[in-house]
Amino acid sequence: MKLLFTFLLTVVSLSVYSQKIPDLKIVDQLDFEVIKKADSTDTIIKLDTIVPIDIKAENWDHTVYNPFKNEVVMFPLQLEFKDSTYASPISKNKVVTSRYGWRRGRGHKGIDIDLITGDSLFSMFDGIVRMSRYSRGHGKTVVVRHYNGLETVYAHLSAYGVKENDSVFKGQYLGKGGVSGNARGSHLHLVVNYKGIAINPEYLFEFNDSNSIRSNEIWVTQQWTRTYVHNSKRQSKIIPLLTEEDAITSLKKQKKIYVVKRGDTLSRISKRNNITIAAICKTNAINKNSVIKPGQKLVIEK
Ligand SMILES: [Zn+2]
C-alpha cells in the first residue's frame, strides 16, 4: 500500500512538472514515462516505446517567416542527419545561379537554383509544413521544419502543393517553382535556417548530382551564417567541421568593443551579440545585476 502511494505521488508530481515543459516526454528515475494527454489523463508506458520529438511544440507559427526572434542561438552548434543524402528540391540538374553571401550591397541568405516556372519542387527531408503562404520578398513560400531542428525554405513559387501542418516525406512534392515576390527571373530561392538563422547551405550540402550531405554530424560556426564573409558570385572554401574541437579551433578569438546604448540591458546585449550574460560579466568583471550606463564600453569576447 505504501509502495502504491509513493508510486501515485510520483506520477502526480511528474504530471505537475510536465505541464511546464512543452515536450511530451518526461522520464523519471523509474522505468516508466508519463505521457500528458489533452484530456489530462496520464498514460504510463514502458521506456522502450519510441516517443517522436514534437517539432511543433515551440515557435509553431504559420504567420511569420521567423518565429524564433526571442531565442538566443549559441555557436558553434551541432547538426545531425540520419542519411548521407538529401532529396533534390528539383528534378533536373541543379544549376546554382547565385550563392549565399554578399550581393549588390546586401546579404543574400539563400542559394538560387535555376528552374522554369511550373517545375515541381520537393522537400529535402522528412518534416512538417510550418508555412505555406505569401511572405514579403519571398513571394509564395513553403517552409518545412525537419526533425533535426533545421527548416528549409522554398521561395518564389507559382503554386502551392501542400498545406500548413501537412507532414511531408523526403522527396515529397511541395509545389511549383516560379517568380513570385522579389525575384529576377524564375528560380528557386532555397534557404536553410536553424532557429531563424540562415546557414550557408553549401557548408552542409553539395549542390551537384550526388545530393550528398557533407557529414552525418556537422558543426556550424557563426562564420557560416554571415553573408558578408561570403560572395554570392563564387563558392566559398568549404572545410566541414566534424568535431566540436574542429569547430572551436576554427574560431579565431574575436574581441570587440560594444558601446552601451540608451535602453540597453545585459539581456539585450547578450542577444544582440550572441553571447551569454555570464560571458559578458566574466570578461568585464561585472555581475548580472550591475547597472550599465549609455556610453559605457563592454568587451565582447567570443
Ligand atoms: Zn535568392
Image (tube, rainbow, N blue to C red):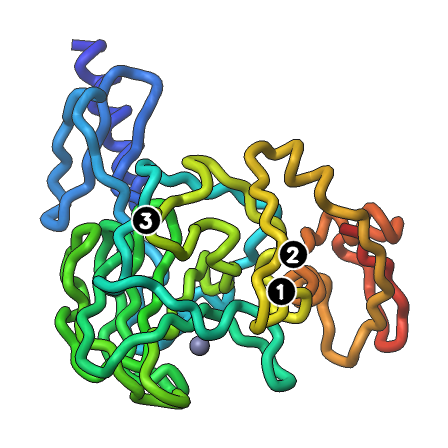
Tell us which disc is closer to us: 3 or 1: 1
Task: Return the mark for residue 226.
Answer: 1
Report which residue position mark 3 lands on. Answer: 22
Helix, strand or loop status at disc 2: helix
- Residue 71 in sight: yes
Q: Position of residue 37 (x, y in %)?
A: 14, 44
Query: What is the quadrant of the N terminus in the image?
Result: top left
Horizontal side of residue 132 vs 239, given as left or right: left
For label 2, the crowd category at 10 Å Cα-Cα, with few meaning under 14, some 14 to 19 and many 20 or more, is: some
Q: Could you tell me the amino acid type at mark 1?
A: Arg
Q: Residue at x 47, y 58 (%)?
A: 201
Q: Residue at x 31, y 27 (%)?
A: 27
Report which residue position mark 2 lands on. Answer: 223
Q: Could you tell me the amino acid type at mark 2?
A: Gln
Ligand number 1: quarter of image: bottom left
For label 3, the crowd category at 10 Å Cα-Cα, with few meaning under 14, some 14 to 19 and many 20 or more, is: few
Q: Position of residue 113 (x, y in %)?
A: 37, 71
Taking 74 as reference, is 161 above or below it?
A: below
Contact check, label 3 and label 1, Cβ < 8 Å? no
How many labels were placed on the picture? 3
Helix, strand or loop status at disc 1: loop
How far apart in space, not on screen, are marks 3 and 2 (Cα)? 31 Å
Q: Earlier in the sequence, mark 3 or mark 2?
A: 3
Horizontal side of residue 21 vs 142, given as left or right: right
